[in-house]
Image: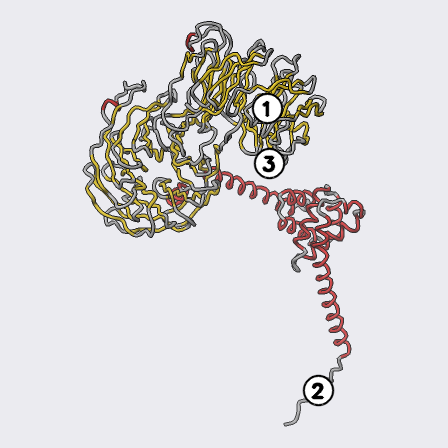
Amino acid sequence: MAEAASGVSRFKANYAIERKMEPFYKGGKVQLDQPGRHLFCVCGTRVNILDVASGAVLRSLEQEDQEDITAFDLSPDDEVLVTASRALLLAQWAWREGSITRLWKAVHTAPVATMAFDPTSTLLATGGCDGAVRVWDVVRHYGTHHLRGSPGVVHLVAFHPDPTRLLLFSSAADAAIRVWSLQDRSCLAVLTAHYSAVTSLTFSADGHTMLSSGRDKICILWDLHSYQATRTVPVFESVEAAVLLPEEPVPTLGMKNSGLHFLTAGDQGKLRVWEAASGQCVYTQPQLPGPGQELTHCALARTAGLLLSVTADHNLLLYEAQSLQLQKQFAGYSEEVLDVRFLGPKDSHIVVASNSPCLKVFELQTSACQILHGHTDIVLALDVFRKGWLFASCAKDQSVRVWRMNKAGQVACVAQGSGHTHSVGTICCSRLKESFLVTGSQDCTVKLWPLPEALLSKSTAPDGSSIVLQAQATQRCHDKDINSVAVAPNDKLLATGSQDRTAKLWALPQCHLLGVFSGHRRGLWCVQFSPMDQVLATASADGTIKLWALQDFSCLKTFEGHDASVLKVAFVSRGTQLLSSGSDGLVKLWTIKNNECVRTLDAHEDKVWGLHCSQLDDRAVTGASDSCVILWKDVTEAEQAEEQAKREEHLVKQQELDNLLHEKRYLRALGLAISLDRPHTVLTVIQAIRRDPEACEKLEATMLRLRRDQKEALLRFCVTWNTNSRHCHEAQAVLGVLLQHEPPEELLAYQGVRAALEALLPYTERHFQRLSRTLQAATFLDFLWHNMKLSPLSTTPTAL
């Protein structure tokens, strides 16, 4: 019995969400505060505030209308944040507390597209999709200017850095820059030199020069006294942002003199520094591989000495401004998460493959992110070697890469191989030792890649160079796409699962076919070996999971419960249970012995492609098409301990209650029963009081000494008791005491008294009618008894 009990305790019963990694930036404006400690970015209906040091989202600000945020700006003194929503409302926030201090209508007839504060943090300019520019005094709370004349959407506004000049600059759909005098409420000049949308305006420290950038591949320097273009610099890329750098020599960036230099960010995906006087590019950042590297935003935080850039893949990169050395990386939006794995010997990190050529590695303790470049197309699958330092990835670019994480948590590519003729959709690492990889592709072949000795030697450090992998064996395995490969725990067997509705078992390293598993009605998405038994699990698009015997290839069990395709399956609890994830967004926990679905975890909103369990088997991680990565914690022991503590507490209180009733200490007994919030226990106490010879007086005395909240609870319990004819007498006795001794105004002040009376009236009426009928029948029986005439009984026997 003890062994059976311990066996039952090993089974998992539930997982709880330990952490949820959601998208925090889906495109649009990003802004740093002056010290560089907080990062503000838009994500749909919210403005998220990130802690730069940890990467964690500190606060999410959402307006009451719950409409998409179209623009926001943080004041230069970092005190005031203003957001504009699609509902044409402007909200002023005390962002540190997360509260709205003022809400007002934007007066624009279309959504606000852009906004900017003046240097004093008192004036706010808003540019609308209706072509209007409005200026607001955020201190005195009124609109100061309404500037019209811009055709189409005003997508850019900026104040002159010198507040005494009271100049406002705006740009609209006609690619012209308008200069507005707030003093005269008029347009001073229209600067027309760009031929495409102007993307940024920035000013020199002395306020005499303005730099504008555009998608027409030029940057223009303007004299702000004559409002004439002094120099046009062709930059040969569509520029999304340009920043004027401090006028001091920085040899590492090619700035050899203290003249005017500016930095551009655009569709080439690299930061470049230009000398304004000569129009020459003096520094170019190294190009990162793969698509999605185009830069969509760039901003300089002068006080913090940081430069922020944003890529088209929604990655936020923080550089040290003097050297352009990368300081921090943040992955704002992962789109569709295709695979996820724990990393490190203690599962301290996770690696995420999303709908992107880049991999993202997150440190779980600090939320720090590292973005890995190498693949040139979408990464489809991941796997980790047993020790946790080495992991492998495969992608649509027909290649496989091996990555190593050092003890500092830094990851670098150490090997790569190519040879498949189509997308590589699945990968599996050897289990016993770090000796080989197996990949499966849409070209219907499986390749075995041995890891060279040079890669496995401890002295190999990630120095940027990577070893080329060579395939040792190639085998055509199926007639359709291979969706999953799995290596047995002894490294001697390989299982493949395909879209052709079969799984196959192969001997390694020669890849000889041993047998075929047939039985699924649709394609297979995942195959997995049991860590303990000679069993293979398969997950299929027919919504089922099957267990197969490796000896005779027979189907042992079938698990049905998912409403759609089962995408991943994993063994947990030493091979006695299964975790599965499906395209219905559900994660299910199964006990193999009785085919029972123990728990269904519903936290994702779309297909759950990624599922992986930690080495200690106490956590799991899932990734889905809803762009969320969820870390699950096994809470079975904690829940069992909590349940045990509740049972013990219940026993102790039940014993105390029995003692109080035995001692006829009814007041304390009733108070204890009410505190337990158990109507039946309270009923037991009331019944014990009513059994007392002096029941009426005892009940009155006890109830009148109760607190008001206890009387409210008692009235609530009466509603339940009154529905049952067996317990209605206790309910009516309690009601009688309350109605006799409580003033009507106090009774009406009880919480929920109206609902209680509505529930009590019909049953009380029914009980009254039943008692009336019983009384009538008893009276009639008594009447009959008294009026019955009985003949006298004869004492002599009747003659025969």
> Residue 526: x and y, percent?
34, 42
Three-letter amino acid code of the residue under disc 1: Asp
Three-letter amino acid code of the residue under disc 2: Ser
Local crowd at mark 1 within 10 Å, few (<14), some, or many (≥20)? Answer: many
Seen in the picture, residue 152 relative to 231 is either above or below; the reply is below
Three-letter amino acid code of the residue under disc 3: Glu
Which residue is depicted at the point 63% across and 94% down? 800
In the figure, is residue 748 to the left or right of 71?
right
Q: Residue furthest top?
A: 257
Residue 67's label in the rendered image is: 3
Q: Secondary structure at mark 1?
A: strand
In the figure, is residue 70 to the left or right of 705?
left
Which comes sooner in the sequence, label 2 or label 3? 3
Local crowd at mark 2 within 10 Å, few (<14), some, or many (≥20)? Answer: few
> Residue 131: x and y, percent?
61, 29
Which comes sooner in the sequence, label 2 or label 1? 1
548 or 471, which is in the foreground?
A: 471
Residue 794's label in the rendered image is: 2
Which comes sooner in the sequence, label 3 or label 1? 3
